[in-house]
Image (cartoon, grey):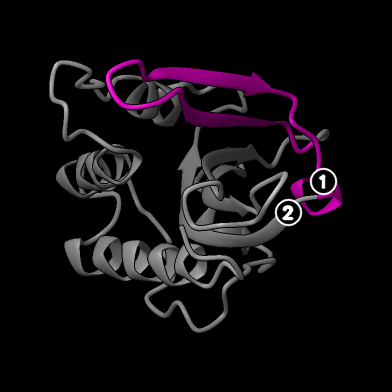
């Protein structure tokens, strides 16, 4: 399975159109993004939200958002299908491109299953959202969908975005 992925995080939002040669036989792709939203009611590092968003280039640009919801010891995976355009959300801050994958149909669930299949370690009192994000990116790397260097770059860019909150914790 061929994959297109940005090696530079310099452009923090990717709106690049995927060329037909990159989309495989069917012409469909799924793009995985990390979305960072401002915290509320006060925008601080710990209140900023980090989501994974999978967008399919079907006629509706269908998307699904995955968020680690809860707090230490009580995390759960929240899945929001049909999230809409994240840029129109009032707290939207940044969209970081992770990977674009060619798929055989818009209903392909491989990428969705990979994100949903990451175990959440509520037994570990040190487990945080950063560990979950690292696990998702590690699974993408293990599946040869991104390189480990790309995963590191994505983590660094996400940390930079979250740590730029105006109010410290």
Asked if residue 123 is positioned above or below residue 39 in the image, the reply reads above
Front in this rendered view, residue 41 or 76: 41
Residue 93 locus on image (x, y percent): 68, 61
Mark 2 lies on a secondary structure that is strand
Residue 52 shows which numbered tag?
Answer: none
* Left or right of 104 in this view: 27: right
In percent of width and height, residue 17 lies at 68, 64
Kindly state the secondary structure of the residue where label 1 is placed: loop
Per the model, the C-alpha gap separating discs 2 and 1 is 5 Å
Question: In the shown orientation, is residue 93 left or right of residue 47?
Answer: right
Q: Which residue is mark 2?
A: 92
**Residue 91's x, y, as percent?**
76, 51
Q: In percent of the image, x 43 and y 63: which residue is there?
A: 158
In the image, the segment drawn in magenta is 61-90
Residue topped by disc 1: 89
Query: Residue 75, located in which quarter of the rendered image?
Result: top left
- Mark 2–mark 1 CB contact (< 8 Å): yes
Up the image or down, 112 lies above or below 53; here it is above
| Residue situated in front as seen by the camera: 17 or 83 | 83
- For label 1, count other residues whose C-alpha is less than 10 Å away and answer few (under 14), some (14-19) or many (20+): few
Left or right: 136 in relation to 15: left
Task: Point out the residue furthest to the bottom here.
Answer: 10
Q: Going 45% across and 22% down the picture, which residue do you hit?
A: 70
């Amino acid at each position: 399975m061929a994959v297109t992925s940005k090696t530079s995080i310099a452009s923090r939002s990717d709106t690049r159109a995927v060329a037909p040669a990159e989309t495989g036989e069917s012409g469909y792709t799924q793009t995985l993004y990390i979305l960072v939203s401002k915290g509320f009611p006060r925008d601080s590092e710990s209140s900023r939200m980090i989501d994974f968003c999978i967008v399919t280039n079907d006629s509706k640009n269908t998307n699904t958002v995955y968020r680690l919801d809860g707090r230490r010891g009580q995390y759960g995976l929240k899945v929001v299908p049909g999230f809409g355009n994240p840029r129109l959300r009032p707290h939207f801050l940044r969209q970081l491109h992770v990977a674009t994958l060619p798929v055989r149909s818009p209903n392909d669930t491989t990428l969705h299953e990979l994100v949903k299949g990451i175990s959440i370690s509520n037994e570990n009192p040190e487990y945080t959202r950063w560990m979950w994000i690292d696990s998702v990116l590690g699974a993408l790397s293990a599946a040869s969908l991104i390189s480990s260097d790309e995963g590191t770059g994505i983590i660094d860019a996400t940390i930079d975005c979250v740590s730029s909150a105006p109010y410290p914790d």
